Image (cartoon, rainbow, N blue to C red):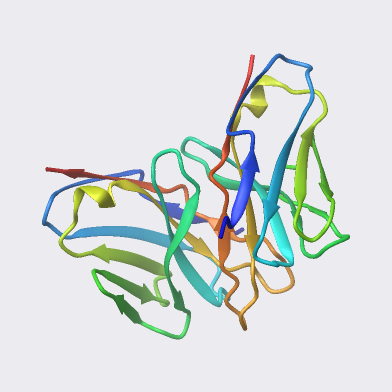
Amino acid sequence: NAGVTQTPKFQVLKTGQSMTLQCAQDMNHNSMYWYRQDPGMGLRLIYYSASEGTTDKGEVPNGYNVSRLNKREFSLRLESAAPSQTSVYFCASSEFRGLSEKLFFGSGTQLSVL
Amino acid sequence: GEDVEQSLFLSVREGDSSVINCTYTDSSSTYLYWYKQEPGAGLQLLTYIFSNMDMKQDQRLTVLLNKKDKHLSLRIADTQTGDSAIYFCAESPPSGTYKYIFGTGTRLKVLA
C-alpha cells in the first residue's frame, strides 16, 4: 500500500524555470492538499482540492497553479520559479470519518531555486 | 486570527519523559492532532484527541487537553532515540473549510 506518492524527491531550478510536482494517492480519498514547509514557519497550505473537479486557494497560493487530474492525482505547477519558492513541498490527502479528518502525507519534494 | 504556537526545541535524555506543549486559539476546533516528522520524511499522524476529552493515553503517549487555557500537550514516556523528530500539533479545520492549522513544530532531540 503506497499511500501518497510524490515525485520528484529533489529538484534544483534556475529562476524563471517552470516545473510540475506530481502527487498520487491510492487510498480513494476525496480531498488532496499541497503544503510548503519552511524553517520556523510550520506547514502552510498552498492549494487544496476538496473533491475531484474542485480546487481552492490556501494561505500562500501566489506563484502556483494546481490541477486535480482525477480522484487519484493532484499536481502543483510553478510557472516561473523564484528563490522565495525554495522550500520543501508536501502533498497530502484526507479521508472523512465522522468529524475526524486525518491527513496522510507524502515524503516531500525538496526544491531549490537558484 | 488562528494561530498555533509551539516551542522550537526540546532536548531530553534517553529514558526520561518528554513533554511537548502547544497553545491554540480556535476554541471551536473539534479535533486536535499530533503529527511526527522524521528526518527526510513526511508527517505521520501520531495521535489525536476529541475536543470534549481531557486526556487520551496510547501506550507511551499521553495527550492532555486544557480547553479553558487552550493548551495541548504530548507526553512521551521512556523516551527513546527513535523518538527524535519534529512534532507538530494541529487543529481541525474551522467549520466549512479544509484548512488545518499547524503549529511551527518542536524539534525533539533525545540524548543517549
Location of residue B75 in the rendering, given as x and y in whole percent from the top left corner:
26, 65
When asked about the image quadrant of residue A13, the answer is top right
Q: Is residue A46 left or right of residue A98?
A: right
Is the residue A98 above or below the residue A50 in the image?
below
Q: Quadrant of the N terminus of chain B?
A: bottom right
Residue drawn 83% across the image and 57% down it: A70
When asked about the image quadrant of residue B54, the answer is bottom left
Q: How many marks?
A: 0
Residue drawn 37% across the image and 75% down it: B66
Q: Quadrant of the C terminus of chain B?
A: top left
Q: Camera-side residue: A35 or A97?
A: A97
Q: Is residue A62 something that shows in the picture?
A: no
Q: Residue furthest front?
A: A1
Is the residue A5 above or below the residue A102 in the image?
above
Q: Is residue B20 something that shows in the picture?
A: yes
Q: Is residue B103 left or right of residue A104?
A: left
Location of residue A80 in the rendering, given as x and y in whole percent from the top left corner:
80, 23
Residue drawn 33% across the image and 59% down it: B21
Location of residue A53 in the rendering, given as x and y in whole percent from the top left corner:
88, 60
Location of residue B17 in the rendering, given as x and y in whole percent from the top left corner:
16, 60
